Image (tube, rainbow, N blue to C red):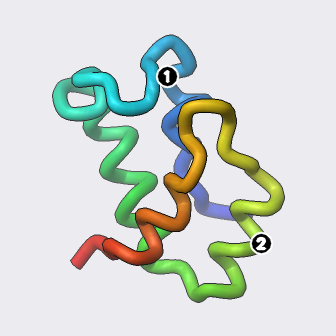
Amino acid sequence: MEGAPTVPWLAFPETLAGSIGWRMGPGEDAYNAFYRWYSGLTDAHAGEFAKQNPEPSGWEGWYERIRTNKWD
């Protein structure tokens, strides 16, 4: 999808889901940028993106958490 930031697990593949690396430094910036972007998608576009970029092991349910806790 054009304009999409890189999903966090590809931006920093060595940083595990739930790691402090997502709460500070460049990991935090990448995480927040993606979260903000994905929160703003329509349900149809979010579903399409998620289908094309499935969550890897350890990240299951992450897209759904963003959709239910959108960035305001």
* Secondary structure of residue under mark 2: helix
Q: Quadrant of the N terminus?
A: bottom right
Q: Quadrant of the C terminus?
A: bottom left
How many C-alpha atoms fall within 10 Å of the one at disc 1: few (<14), some, or many (≥20)? some
Residue 3, picture quadrant = bottom right
Residue 2, picture quadrant = bottom right
Q: Position of residue 35 (x, y in %)?
A: 39, 58
Decide if residue 30 is on the left or right side of residue 42: left
Decide if residue 55 is on the left or right side of residue 13: right
Picture residue at 28% right of the left edge, 71% below the top? 71
Identity, as a three-letter code, of the amino acid under mark 2? Glu
Residue of label 2: 48
Q: What is the residue that sits farthest to the right in this orientation? A: 52
Residue 50, picture quadrant = bottom right
Picture residue at 82% right of the left edge, 56% below the top? 52
Mark linked to residue 12:
1
Q: Who comes first in sequence, dot 2 or dot 1?
A: 1
Q: Position of residue 30 (x, y in %)?
A: 38, 39
Q: Is residue 26 above or below residue 39?
A: above
Picture residue at 34% right of the left edge, 31% below the top? 18
Q: Position of residue 26 (x, y in %)?
A: 29, 27
